[in-house]
Image (spheres, helix red, strand yellow):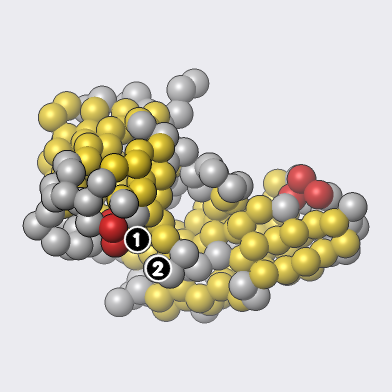
Amino acid sequence: DAGVIQSPRHEVTEMGQEVTLRCKPISGHDYLFWYRQTMMRGLELLIYFNNNVPIDDSGMPEDRFSAKMPNASFSTLKIQPSEPRDSAVYFCASRQTGTHQPQHFGDGTRLSIL
Amino acid sequence: EDQVTQSPEALRLQEGESSSLNCSYTVSGLRGLFWYRQDPGKGPEFLFTLYSAGEEKEKERLKATLTKKESFLHITAPKPEDSATYLCAVQAQSDYKLSFGAGTTVTVRA
């Protein structure tokens, strides 16, 4: 079975540019999560969706970050304008409904802002 | 706020040398505690879910246990392929978010 698919795997861009990260969750999963991982702060939840609706965006660092889920099989995380401190690995995860269902992660996008 | 503390930060083992990793947590009503394995350049890979104190789960050389305040991941007779970072996360009753610890990086030498 296909897992969570993220693209691109690597992104290098200059400060001030717009960055768009993409995620395809596992089919049939109705929760989708975006995380950021850095050496200093570990894995941090940015936002999560249930049935394409944003439920909790309290982890989004500032207005430069936005996330959308236009349908059950696609989500984007956008940073505009990007800054060097946004450099990190961004992960997408999905899970099924159910009390003890685990989240399944993609392999991430390594983002470097120069 | 949910808190997860993992120790040690790093663990170097000789092949066959069993050891344990600790995950201490504070959460207002535990829905579940999750263990993940992360290899370099990859996303976290799900290992176990534990729901209630006293529960144990096993998979190959790994066994996870849960008490009311902490969880242990025991690695029995490890092999070099068990080298990875092991992450612990908790989910509160009130939510579907996971709060992660910083992880324990395990290196097993042949």
Which residue is depicted at the point 12% across and 54% down? A64
What kind of element bears circle 1? strand
Which residue is depicted at the point 29% across and 61% down? A85
Q: Residue B58, how many percent across, how many down?
A: 70, 51
Which residue is depicted at the point 51% across and 76% down? B5
**How many numbered discs sit on the rendered protein?**
2
Asked whether A66 or B65 is in front, the reply is A66
How crowded is the residue under tag 1: few (<14 C-alpha within 10 Å), some, or many (20+)? some
Asked whether A51 or B105 is in front, the reply is B105
Task: Give the quarter of the image for residue B12.
Answer: bottom right
Quarter of the image with the N terminus of chain B in it: bottom left
- Assess whether mark 1 and mark 2 are in contact (beta carbons under 8 angstroms): yes
Asked whether B20 or B27 is in front, the reply is B20
The residue where tag 2 is placed is A41
Calculate the distance from the C-alpha at mark 2 to the C-alpha at mark 1: 7 Å
Q: Residue A4, how many percent across, how many down?
A: 40, 32
Q: Residue A98, how many percent across, how many down?
A: 35, 43
Task: Give the quarter of the image for residue A106.
Answer: top left
